[in-house]
Amino acid sequence: MKIAPRQIDSFLQSPDPETRAVLVYGRDAGQVHERLASLIAAVLEDPDDPFCLSELQAADIRKDPARLVEEASALALTGGRRVVRILSASDALTPSLRDFLAEPKGEALLLLGADELGPRSTLRRLFEDDKQAAAVPCYGDEGAGLERIIREALHPLEIDLDARSYLLNHLGGDRLVTRRELEKLKLYVEGNERVTLTDVVESIGDSSTLTLEDIAFAVGQGARSSLEEALERVHLEGSSPVAILRATSHHFLRLHLVRSHMDRGENPGEALKTLKPQVFFKRVPAFREQAGRWSLPALGRALALLAEREVACKSSGLPAKAICDRTLLELATRSGKEG
């Protein structure tokens, strides 16, 4: 079954006892991790009990499909239900999971964590359609959802409007990163009653989320030297190539939206106001220049290339870092040179 967004919180707190397997997937790896942890806590009396929780990599099941049934059938030495957590799940596991759901063994709950899965994904469709399974999407925090996380994390502090806008514009891509940055911010302002824009910039100004934005702006500007420096930094910090490509795609989608309004006759200032969240004020001049530099067809080709290379990172077998860097340098070279 497909868990609707409004039902996710209640499902995580109390999953249906008849559910034998749950797929948690999406581009927000931190949110996937957090929701898997919530399900484990809801099912197990002691989530740290190694006799009640076992972990498998998807590759373990592909090499030996019998491992899935063995782990699902095993009994907890201390009694109670067990959980089998399966990481890095993909469509390659669909046959094994289909066989398991057709005739479940044991009492364990299977929890699968996966990256983003499109509507045509066989694994996602299996979990959405089977009555004994559930699919929980994780598409990142934004809008009211992100604002709620910010408000709860910083409570009881008051947040200035421009500080709130900055946080909304720079956080949300990864739930764990968002929580870490907000914890750091709260420690930074300890003893104060309000959070100002200066506090926010000085606290999270060196976060990887800003570096990803630096990459996207460098690509749009055609600034190869700045791009190479930012890429070196995010690779050292451990950011995944897919996350880097997605951050750049997000930037180009926003450019595409603004440029489409400009081509319909709106001035750049009016077009920029259509973006939610708004561009951070210090970035506005560069964003406006890029919206004028890139034509709609060129932006469309850039977005298609980014999507194509993201798939290549996941499935081609070639080094994802090399694919990512080559793609972004190629786009930076194109900047402003295509009609």
Image (cartoon, helix red, strand yellow):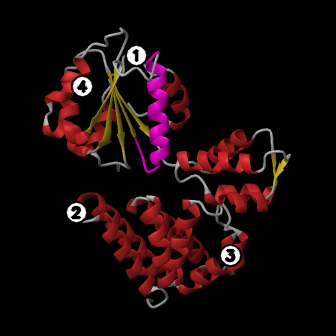
Query: Foreground residue, 125 or 155?
Result: 155
The local secondary structure at tag 4 comes to helix
- The numbered disc on residue 17 is 1
Residue 204: x %, y % from top left:
65, 58
Q: Is residue 147 left or right of residue 2?
A: right
Mark 4 sits on what residue? Answer: 101
**Amino acid at circle 1:** Pro
- The numbered disc on residue 284 is 3
Name the residue located 43 percent from the left edge and 89 percent from the top edge: 338
Pointer 4 or 1: first along the chain = 1
Structural distance between the alpha carbons of marks 3 and 4: 52 Å
Q: Main secondary structure of the magenta part?
A: helix
Neighbourhood count class around disc 4 (C-alpha, 10 Å): few under 14, some 14–19, many 20 upward: some
Provide the residue span drawn in magenta: 25-45
> Would you say the residues marked 2 and 4 are in contact, meaning their CB atoms lie under 8 Å apart?
no
Residue 102 showing in the rendered view: no
Mark 2 sits on what residue? Answer: 316
Residue 51: x %, y % from top left:
33, 18
